[in-house]
Image (spheres, rainbow, N blue to C red):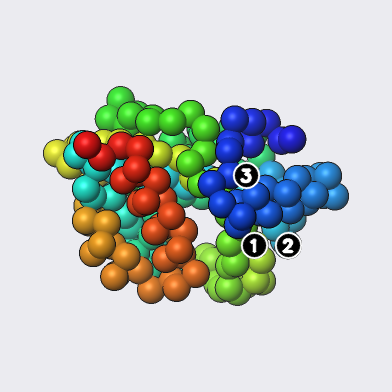
Amino acid sequence: MMDILCGFKPKNEQEKVDVELTEKYHNLFNDIWTRDNTLCHLTSSAVIVNEDFTKILVIFHNIYKSWSWVGGHADGEHNLLNVALKETQEETGLDANEIKVLENTPISFEILPVASHLRRGKYVSCHTHLSVAYLFQASEKSKIRILEEENSNIAWLPFDEFLSKSTEPHMIPVYTKIFKYIEENYKK
């Protein structure tokens, strides 16, 4: 099994199947850690919750034109927790000392479709993201900012409001699964 999935326990059939497929891709391709693999590559996202586990810090993603979690490509980095932390800092402006890692292993794993799009004026064909997500916590009082090249808005949104604002239908089950996990394991 790949190191990133050590300690990860699939919560449902979808995660079990997606982990198995990712292991096959990892054995089949030597480049899933980079975007050189134009069919599928690893990404890491962050679910950033507030102190009382009622809101999520999200961005309005310029490419997807939707409210979304933060995250990005592994780009050769094999520690996907570090990727999620780096992306959180870049996309939200949070300082490293303002981010609390709640779990060192991923809380979610999926294979996600990505539609063809333009990125920095260059065509990117449709592909899939082999996506892990980590759970972080930060204070709503922390200073945040927009990363204009990637997002055009940033906000702390209650879970239900975020779900109603997301315009990516394939992501709603992912976010719902994660919010259920948070509800069952963190909310008092």
The residue pinned by badge 3 equals 75
User: Residue at position x 32%, y 65% from top?
Assistant: 163
Query: Residue at position x 23%, y 50% from top?
Result: 55
Q: Residues within 10 Å of mark 3 (few under 14, many from 20)?
A: some
Sequence order check, earlier mark of 3 and 2: 2
**Residue assigned mark 1:** 128
Secondary structure under tag 2 reads loop
User: In this rendering, would 121 be left or right of 101?
Assistant: right
Badge 3 vs badge 1, beta-carbon distance below 8 Å: no
Residue type highlighted by circle 2: Leu
Q: Residues within 10 Å of mark 2 (few under 14, many from 20)?
A: few
Say which residue label 2 marks: 39
Secondary structure category for the residue under label 3: loop
- Viewer-closest of 38 and 171: 171
Residue 179 or residue 188, whichever sits in front:
188
Mark 2 and mark 1 in contact? Answer it, CB < 8 Å.
Answer: yes
Residue 36: x, y in percent? 73, 53
Q: Identify the residue at image location x=28%, y=50%.
A: 56
Q: Nearer the viewer, mark 3 or mark 1?
A: 1
Q: Left or right? Give the position of 68 relative to 105.
A: left
Q: Look at 65% across and 50% down and name the residue there.
A: 16
Measure the C-alpha gap from mark 2 to mark 1. Answer: 6 Å
Amino acid at circle 3: Asp
Residue occupying the far left of the picture: 141
Element under disc 1: strand
Label 3, label 2: how far apart the Cα atoms are = 14 Å
Mark 1: few/some/many CA within 10 Å (<14, 14-19, 20+)? some
Q: Is residue 102 above or below residue 145?
A: above
Q: Please tell me in which quadrant of the rendered image residue 76 appears.
A: top right
CA distance for labels 3 and 1: 15 Å
